[in-house]
Image (tube, coloured by chain):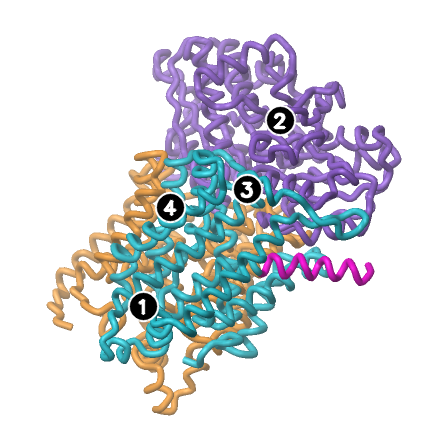
Chain colours: A cyan, B purple, C orange
Amino acid sequence: MDISFFLIQALNGVQYGFLLFLVASGLTLIFGIMGVINLAHGSFYMIGAYLAYWLTGLTGSLLLAILLGLPLAVLTGLAIERFAISHLYTRDHLYQVLLTYGLILIFNEMQSILWGNDLYGVAIPEMLTGSIRLTETQSYPVYRLFVSLVCILVALGMLLTIQKTRLGMMIRAGASNREMTQILGLNIKQLYAIVFGAGAGLAAFAGMMAAPIEAVYPGMGEGILITSFVVVVIGGIGSIKGAFFGAMLIGLADTFGSVLVPDYSGIVIYALMALVLLWRPQGLFGQRV
Amino acid sequence: MSKIKRTDHRRRRFIQGAVAGAAITAFAPSRFAIGGTAKVKVGILLPYSGTYAFLGEKITAAMKFAIAQAGGKLGGRDIEFVQLDSEAKPPKATENTNKLITGENVDFLVGPVHSGVAMAMAKIAREENVITIVPNAGANQLTGPLCAPNIFRTSFSNWQPSFPSGKVVYDDGHRNVVTMAWNYGAGKQALGGFSQGFEDAGGKIVKQILTPFPKVEFQAYLTEIAALKPDAVFVFYAGGGAIKFVKDYAASGLKDKIPLYSSGFLTEGTLKAQGAAAEGIKTTLHYSETLDNPANRIFRPAFEKATGKSADVFAVQGYDTGLLLLQAMNAVKGDTGAQKEIITAMENAVIDSPRGKWTFSAAHNPIQDFYLRQVVDGQNKVLGIAHKALSDLAKGCRMG
Amino acid sequence: MTNLRPTRLYLLIALCIVIAVGLFPLFGEKFHILLATRIFILAIFAMSLNLLIGFTGLISFGHAAFFGAAGYILAFVAPEDGAAAFWWSAPLSIGGAALLAAGIGWMSIRTSGVYFIMITLAFAQMLYFFFNDSPYFGGSDGAFIYFKPSLAIGSFDPVNLDNRVHFYYLAAILVLVVWAFLAMLLRSPFGQVIKGLRANEPRMRALGYPTQRYKLVSFIIAGGLAGLAGYLNAAQSGYISPAHLGWQESGSVMMMVILGGMGSLHGPILGAFTFVLLHDILRDLSQHWLLLMGGVIVAIVLFLPNGLAGLFTRKRIPQRDDDHD
């Protein structure tokens, strides 16, 4: 075990963290601004992956598939917000948990009806198929680095949107004080729809980006869902910055946990989450409620 | 066969003395007496939703296909299938099995895919003494300590497909091997089979890596393998994990440096999704779609035409389950009450399967050939027989 | 709450139910007796969760952990060649579950809201992986309880759990016992305080109640009762697996509570009954039955927030709990 081994593992962790961030950022937005626990978030990740598979097959290009699929996913998100989620804003979290649990079942069956239960894969786009030699035995696929790059761009984009635009101002206002936002004449309904659509879009986008390095299979959304929740809770609900550091922390902890405590590596991220919450019950960057 | 049976007697004695008259009907000697024209009830407990749904669908389709091809009857009697979605959930397994056995009074029970479900199911099947055919679940225990006269398996034990790989890897000149699998029953037992075969041949397992199930993030382990630099790697993954692992292994550049071996599930039903990443991988399994024998030549096109599903090892296991039911029921001319005779017929059955002819071991697990296969042009090409007529060790099986 | 107080009607209905439950094994089919027993067990499980989410206002998303852990304790202490005595194995399982709840609760109640939901989920997941990965408990394939526990005292052995009718009556009686226990608990000063917690925690704190301690005790009681259900479940099926502790199981029991009506004493019993039947009926309808199940869940949340019990009691606001008599 030399230094390069640890560096590569760190790279693995960071890279995994970026992907987690992409999924978790949408979750934390919905959490923080709308106060909604969305268990169906993983389903949007799955929808994204299946759309990528389906549309890549039709168009022959992952880029086209993303351009076509993203609006579809966002529209699905908007429809879900309009017909289901919007009725729950004033209700207890419990109902949100249950309703979105029901949505998971519905989405899973829709996937089974539309695309069957077989397993699929998506090819990596031609120009990104190469890999970079790291050590004598291991190289790093260019596509993974590309995914990380895209994640950084998305993170920066979100930061800019929230800090610098009118929409961002509304989001910040909505997150801190719902009634005040309304009194100021901002359309909270519209804001919520936008946020939910964006969150669903982010998850679907993550699924699309991950499709070429993942397998596309039934139930793929549930695994990433629970991990994303851990990320969001560690980072502090509603904090994009928190989601980012949470994702990095989980990515690294999971990677090094796999190597250092292999027998119980499944427990590592949950133990980390419990420790963080014991130390700071509102997560690393969360507001005290 | 001792413990559970004792409970069983105790309960029966009790019930017979108890007021619960309704309960007694289930012990009526022969349902066949009700009338020779009554339908044979075959209960199927397989997953039809969730990650394992494609396995359940395929096994069911293939079993029905086998019976339909033979005229759609079992021993001259019509069949009623009672299908139940197991959801691959062990907590629901007991209730589901009870529903089929005591609720529906099925004559035969077929299932499941998931080993955890199989454990719960086998326990009840033993107590209730219903003939049970396991078309997939590989838990060694089923034909080991849990073996029973009324439990048969048409698939494999987890130990079986990977044991022959041990010698294959050794004969390819590899001495130091890293093994890797999901940390669950099937994974650990598969690695156990490989280790035994490999160490018996004289090889050394450098490290055994168990990864949390069903997580599919493998980068950290690949880096570890790259650092350990073994001669070869042996893994057990299936389904979505198999696709992901094979792709990741190739993408990390390891494939060209350290050859990858596995039991055949790594490349069953997943080759299309794995694409070029799977080329060259050697596996051992009791079937290959390219196997050249008369039964397979007929089976493949006919099955694919009839069901629209691709014929793979899971289809063959379902198909053989159908063949077994046909043979046994023909032997007793449809008399489901003649349980002893049915069991004898099954024990003596020779299944002319697309995987090659096979028979049952004393523990009711197939004695079958294991083929060495290599992925060439997106197909599992058969290189030869890795182990002829391999029988499971059946550790701990005491057939009563 | 505008209560009609149809006491006599309720008594009559209750009497009918008790008689029906009592007579059912005489003409019920074998499988239905098993199914009913299972529903009783799930009803106890749901009642235990209801104490948390319906009365104390603690939304635990990891309640299956206690259910499963109790089962594992039974599997671990039960000998392979004979029956474990009910009289020590049951208290051990329940006590173990309660002890676990004390540990998890002590850490979890520091958080609130969404964080509480998530930290309870995290602990349940940790236990899931513990039983799944550890080499000592049978791993993912699970573990058996070879013999049903024995209730014999010396040579006096009136209740034989190998007999499904006996098991049925035991489970039915335990439902009643748990119900009565919870009814008394909620009428006690302790019950008044935890209900106050749910309605307005800051006020209770301001009144000088050590609110954390009350929450913890409630969490421990709920864990212990879930342990009782888990013990019975493991005894009945003779099998326990890590999946029994999974988040889907925690979700199912939550569903039973909501379906029946949280904050109502008998709601969870109704919920368990309906949930199991709904599951069985829908599954027979179509291969894509989960679509229907999902639809029903969504519909219940949207249109029936008070659950089935709410249909009868005309309770309006699900958040507040005024009266459940």
Label 1 CA crowd tier, 10 Å (few <14, some 14–19, many 20+): some
- Chain letter of the residue carrying label 3: A
Disc 2 with disc 4 on a shared chain:
no
Most prominent secondary structure in the magenta stretch? helix
Task: Where is residue B203? Give x, y as percent.
Answer: 86, 37
Q: For residue A215, which numbered disc appears in the image?
A: 3
Residue A43 seen in render: yes
Mark 2, residue position: B378
Name which of mark 3 and mark 4 comes first in the sequence: 4
Q: Mark 3, mark 1: which one is toward the viewer? A: 3
Task: Where is residue C91? Give x, y as percent.
Answer: 52, 64
Gap between marks 3 and 1, in whole Å? 36 Å
The magenta segment: A1-17
Mark 4, residue position: A107
Query: Which residue is located at x 62 percent, y 58 percent?
Result: A15
Gap between marks 4 and 1, in whole Å? 23 Å
Q: For residue A79, which numbered disc appears in the image?
A: none
Disc 3 with disc 1 on a shared chain:
yes
- Chain letter of the residue carrying label 1: A
- Chain letter of the residue carrying label 4: A
Gap between marks 2 and 3, in whole Å? 17 Å
State the SS at label 3.
loop
Residue B9 seen in render: no
Gap between marks 2 and 1, in whole Å? 52 Å
Name the quarter where the C terminus of chain A is drawn.
bottom left
Query: Which residue is located at x 67 percent, y 27 percent?
Result: B375
> Measured along the vertical axis of the image, is residue C238 above or below residue A183?
above
Disc 4 with disc 1 on a shared chain:
yes
Question: Mark 2–mark 3 contact, CB under 8 Å?
Answer: no
User: Is residue A141 rendered to the left or right of residue B28?
Assistant: right
Question: Mark 2–mark 1 contact, CB under 8 Å?
Answer: no
